[in-house]
Image (cartoon, grey):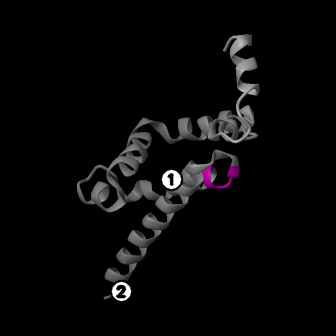
Amino acid sequence: MAAQDLDSLTLVNPDSNQEEEFSIPLNISDIITICREFNELGTKIQKQVENILEFGVKESIHTGLVKQKSLPYIKNFLNSISKNAYFGDAVTQAEECIHLISEYESTLVNLDLN
């Protein structure tokens, strides 16, 4: 980003949403940490995370796009996102996804008990 671009970011109207977006105190070390964690998942599980976000939990599992044995790894990664409030809307999305995975897992447990 050029210096003039940085200057234009500071001149944004105080009432605009753009200023809020650029004033979020996201630290680059947070980004690096989450990138490392995503990398540690490996490409197969990374693709499964993408499928869950694109198609939803139940559909991804029922169609075989996501393996049940991958769910703990996916939840762990999503928990990493949800622990950092500076990730904004991604935190809410991660929490919702964790909730849906947990609901799916509890449904499986209930089926096994019957």
Q: Which residues fall within the magenta stretch?
A: 81-85
Image quadrant of residue 20? top right
Q: Going by the image, does 32 lie left or right of 56?
A: right
Is residue 59 something that shows in the picture? yes
* Residue depicted at 36% across the width and 86% down the height: 113
- Between 57 and 17, the residue placed more toward the observer is 17
Task: Give the image location of residue 3, x and y in percent.
Answer: 74, 12
Q: Amino acid at mark 1?
A: Tyr
Disc sitting over residue 101 in the figure: none
Q: Secondary structure at mark 1?
A: helix
> What residue does disc 1 label?
73
Q: Earlier in the sequence, mark 2 or mark 1?
A: 1
- As shown in the figure, which amino acid type bears the numbered disc 2? Leu
Indicate whether 61 appears above or below 103.
above
- On the image, the x and y values in percent for residue 36 come to 61, 35
Mark 2 near mark 1, Cβ–Cβ under 8 Å?
Answer: no
Judge left or right: residue 45 versus residue 95. Answer: left
Which residue is under mark 2? 113
Circle 1 packing at 10 Å, graded few (<14), some (14-19), many (20+), is some
Pick the quarter of the image with the C terminus: bottom left
At 37% across and 83% down in the image, what residue appears?
110
Query: In the figure, 85 relative to 100: above or below?
Result: above
The residue drawn where x is 72% and y is 32% is 28
Q: Position of residue 53 (x, y in %)?
A: 40, 49
Residue 82 counted in the magenta span? yes
